[in-house]
Amino acid sequence: MSDQPVSGNRPDTLSRRTFLRAAGVAGGAALGPAVLRRKAEAQETPSPIRPDPSAKRGGTLRYAVHNAPAHFDVHQSGTVANIGPQSPMYDTLLRRDPKDGQTIIPDLAWKYEISPDGKKYTFHLRKGVKFHDGADFTAEDVKATYDRIVRPPKGVVIPRTPLFATVSEIVVVDPHKIEFRMSEARPKAFMLGSFASGWNIIVRKKTLEENQGNLRQVMNYPGTGPFKHVSRQDKEVWIMDRNPNYWNKGLPYIDKLEVYHMFPFSPELGSAFISGKVDYARLLDPVSWRKAKEMPGVTAAAFNQSVIQAFWTNMKKKPLADPRVRRAIHLAMDRHTLVEVVKDTAPMQIGGFVYPFHPMSTPKAELEKRLGYQKDMKPAVQEARRLMQEAGYGQGIKGLDFVVRDIQTFKLWAVAIQAMLKEHINIECNLRTVQTSVWFDEAAAGNFDLAISAIVSTLMDPSDYFSAWYGQNGPQNYSVWTNEQFHSLTRQIDRELNDTKRKALVRKAEDILEQDPPLIPVAYEQIYDAYYNKVRGQNPSTYFGIYDVVRWDQVWLA
Amino acid sequence: MRKYLARRALFALGTLIGVSLIIFVVLRILPGDPLVAILGVEGHARMTKEDRVRIMHDLGLSDPLPVQYVHWLRDIATGKLGKSFFRGDTVADLILHRGPISAEIGILALIVSWLVGLPVGIVSAVKPNSSLDNIARSLAILFIAIPGFWLGMLIVLALLFWFGYKSPLIIVHVWQSPWQNLQIVIGPAIVLGLAQGAYIARMARSCLLEVIREDYVRTARAKGVVERRVVLGHALPNALLPVITISGVLLGFVLGGSVAVEQAFGVPGLGRALVTAVIERDIIVVQNLVLLYAAIFVVVNLLVDLSYAWLDPRIHYA
């Protein structure tokens, strides 16, 4: 880590040039401080997302994504049901560049600085930005937004709160400058990723005050985003118009955005796209996606999603408390077959305990040489049987209660897993399919032996999900798994600022998880999008997840 | 007649109170946490006990059950029917917006069932055991056996893959665009109507077969009345009573069937709203929609009973 403060705004050279120009001007005796001040103001750099002169303006984009949200509070949500229709109305401090979905670029903060010790993040906010109700956007709004995210009021639950666990103070320096002071430094990529997360939209301080910090039932609260609310028909469509006063002049291109609510992976969504009733469909089922791929004038894209599909083993039940038994179960999974089993229901890929596409995880080619991930199951099954023997369960285990979430993929997998466990290590289990709401009750209460579901994280960074999924008292550690060596390693990973050293620690943690599994990874989800080629300016193939590049300001219709 | 009506109205009220109590209690003792849908999986996992208490209180779910029930009755009395747990929309608004589409489907389905079922039943009865009768009976059994949602999905897929057609994605009311509205309701109405038509055909056939053997029909024929008039003018009206009765019962099937068929066709009607509410455990919406369906069922059956007197002058209600 350099001793120099780190700053970010994409056109670095432009800032320098502006600075030199301002300095030159300052040297001129004829110019006074008023001019200097004006020059300093001019330093604010425009958004890296610039209007493309060749882009066509106007038109209505019809976008289908997920069923309707359960409420309207984006901060409190964990589902694309909110992000999908609501994000176009809001902005964030930083954002992911829609060109690649990865690079972090300025948004409402045109520049940021990180102190040398990594414990202070300073954001310089754009001036002249207005909320949709005409109010000025200031640092007070950022403070109110993040105060709520960092320390939610009672009855408000925000899944992103842990990302900012080390933020001790948020200080408004002036109306357009704000500091986040931290008790402890966190890796830069982790923190910037958190600020750039599509979930952390900026809302008005007044809105939060008027609603006691809870926006669950407030449908149309003002944002600063490229689109403005027009109307909403519950469970059908959310209609937005172009914001003519958007701060990023020249954007958005399209006049109207219609967001249709349709169940993910449903035939209804597929048929709406194939029949041309929508221009862009997200979360298509594989059958419709393959059909779309064959259609002329259509682009079908696949990209990674921040969801692990897994089943948990209840550590409170005696045979499953033994790491050898859990490792045997882990090795008994034929993951290639499991991906195949659901290939017409949902797109999946093989992975272990860390996102398989993250730079810190074991590369896929290497992973597939490991026991439990190979196509040839023989060595893994042999080892699994040996472990069962060693643990004293060579004859197998009978009567495990396998709780299955009532979703097609889990139902298909549960049957396959049941067969694999029986065939490979003679574990017999009884399937118990329950509704989603019941599943989480049962999982939280520990009323299961095995339980299959999926969980999500905000970031790809292990510091986001290691503690939630595998941490002691982690909210999604349904197995109630503990491993002191792993927990202490997690603390190191959270604090380590050097990427190379951090990667080595993550690999070490991965090794522990392989030997003492807190859950049994089944697969990692992918997202299938399809759009007619008249939709331009969007390239989802390299995106990670569906929660960050969601604003449609750069999209135009040919 | 007035006495009879008052008695029936009282009986209907008792039935509805019974239904309301059952659905109210059942929804509250069923396992499953509505907060999973409200907070999402991640939010739910991170919720503290204090958060839970606060949210349950905000939703009115921490009150004792009798208090919650009285609140619901109050909401019914005010006509708002309470608010959805989630987005804060009133159930009354939901019914006003989606109800007309489901009502259209129900009425159209009933019309289709009569238009299809009655002629088939008559032809079968007039020419029993003929090849026409055999075909009609086979088709009737087929449509009774095929689940509506499956047939619906087949129709949706066939229209999509052969003609690239899909009905409108959002509700278009008949007064907004009759053509678009028809595209939304016609599919579910035909699927539901065919299944009910099959029952009506079978019922009409057996009733007509029985009536055709009556003395007065034989007398009419002996007097040289044209066969068409014998069947349609003399036999059919007397065979219709059981068919009307079964139509009332079938309306219950139409209401129940519409839940799955609306889902298959992607029609945003009340049936679909009920499915979504069940998935989300939005118990306020579920309890009101179930009560509404029960009320429709009770009222339709009352109307069926009253229609007897109109169709058969020998029947008097006292």
Image (cartoon, grey):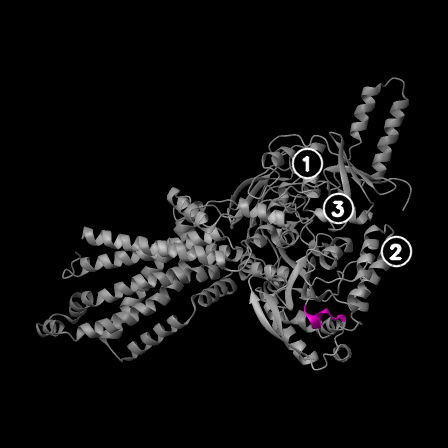
Q: What secondary structure do most residues of the magenta stretch adopt?
A: helix
Kind of element beneath mark 2: helix
Disc 2 residue crowd, few under 14, some 14–19, many 20+, Cα 10 Å: few
Circle 1: residue type? Ala
Percent of width and height locating residue A352: 75, 65
Question: Label 1, label 3: how many angstroms apart (C-alpha)?
Answer: 16 Å
Q: Chain of mark 2?
A: A
Kindly report which numbered mark, 1 or 3, lies closer to the viewer in this rendering. 3
The residue under the point 52% across, 44% down is: A232
The residue segment tinted magenta is: A317-323
Circle 3: residue type? Ala
Q: Earlier in the sequence, mark 1 or mark 3?
A: 1
Percent of width and height locating residue B208: 22, 71
Relative to B7, A369 lies left or right = right
Q: Chain of mark 3?
A: A
Q: Which residue is mark 1?
A: A144
Percent of width and height locating residue A475: 68, 55
Q: Residue A551 is drawn in which quadrant?
A: top right
Give the mark count.
Answer: 3
Question: Label 2, label 3: how many angstroms apart (C-alpha)?
Answer: 22 Å
Q: Earlier in the sequence, mark 2 or mark 1?
A: 1
Q: Which residue is mark 3?
A: A165
Q: Which residue is mark 2?
A: A501
Is B67 covered by the magenta stretch? no
